[in-house]
């Protein structure tokens, strides 16, 4: 396996003959989201923030088709309102929902899937990290979690989110014999879990 650290990944290509690349976003119930922000935001504010961040991630897909995997009626209605397709996966948990979602998209003939978390409030363009082959991983800014992962849909890649998921996903690519590109992106690397995450650095001169 080759491991490449890069900052300017290859642009993805969406074929005019059909969908080659799709975005998959797992979204939990907005009313249950971001409990660790309770010291800074009340429940209504946390719900509104979760919805706003998820919308930002959908918009960052730009022209790439988006599927939202969820098990909540309000999330399903929101997904339809922002132009996304819905994959209904009740009681699967995050890993189960993502693994099944990728398999479902593979069954539709999609070749590459960009799996992006819904709590990336500064995401601008997911397409620039899609790549053309192998696995692309965007770790969080702590090099612990995996904020975005791009995988060949038919590869059998098994997602394993949670603490230290970035290392596990590197090992999973190795297990499958897939080349992996690690993209360190300021905006995609910034997720929101704790009150301190609500105040990002000044990126006025960055992408």
Image: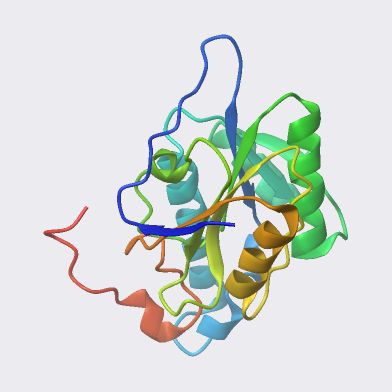
Q: What residue lies at 68% left-to-right and 28% top-to-bottom? A: 110
Residue 141, position as x, y percentages in the image = 40, 74
Q: Is residue 71 left or right of residue 140?
A: right
Foreground pick, 39 / 5: 5
Outermost residue on the bottom side: it is 39
Foreground pick, 123 / 165: 165
Foreground pick, 127 / 31: 127
Whether residue 118 is visible to the viewer of this picture, yes or no, is no
To which quarter of the image does residue 63 belong?
top left
Q: What residue lies at 67% left-to-right and 71% top-to-bottom? A: 168
Residue 174, position as x, y percentages in the image = 67, 61
Outermost residue on the right side: it is 91
Residue 162, position as x, y percentages in the image = 67, 75
Q: How many numbered marks does the figure carry?
A: 0
Q: What residue lies at 86% left-to-right and 54% top-to-bottom? A: 90
Residue 115, position as x, y percentages in the image = 60, 50
Q: Name the quarter where the N terminus is drawn.
A: bottom right
Q: Is residue 112 left or right of residue 193?
A: right
Foreground pick, 53 / 138: 138
Say if 59 sits above or below 192 in the image: above
Say if 172 sits above or below 193 in the image: above
């Amino acid at each position: 396996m080759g491991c490449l650290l890069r900052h300017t990944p290859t642009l993805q290509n969406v074929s005019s003959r059909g969908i080659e690349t799709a975005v998959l976003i797992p979204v939990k119930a907005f009313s249950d989201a971001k409990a660790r922000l309770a010291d800074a935001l009340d429940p209504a504010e946390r719900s509104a923030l979760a919805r706003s961040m998820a919308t930002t991630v959908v918009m960052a897909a730009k022209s790439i088709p988006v599927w939202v995997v969820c098990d909540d009626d309000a999330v399903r209605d929101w997904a339809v309102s922002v132009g996304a397709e819905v994959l209904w996966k009740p009681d699967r948990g995050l890993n189960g929902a993502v693994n099944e979602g990728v398999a479902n998209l593979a069954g539709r003939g999609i070749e590459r899937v960009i799996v992006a978390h819904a709590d990336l409030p500064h995401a601008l363009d997911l397409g620039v990290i899609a790549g053309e082959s192998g696995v692309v991983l965007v770790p969080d800014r702590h090099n612990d979690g995996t904020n975005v992962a791009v995988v060949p849909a038919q590869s059998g890649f098994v997602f394993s989110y949670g603490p230290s998921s970035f290392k596990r996903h590197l090992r999973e690519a190795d297990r499958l014999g897939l080349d992996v590109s690690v993209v360190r992106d300021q905006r995609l690397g910034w997720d929101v879990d704790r009150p301190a995450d609500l105040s990002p650095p000044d990126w006025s001169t960055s992408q």
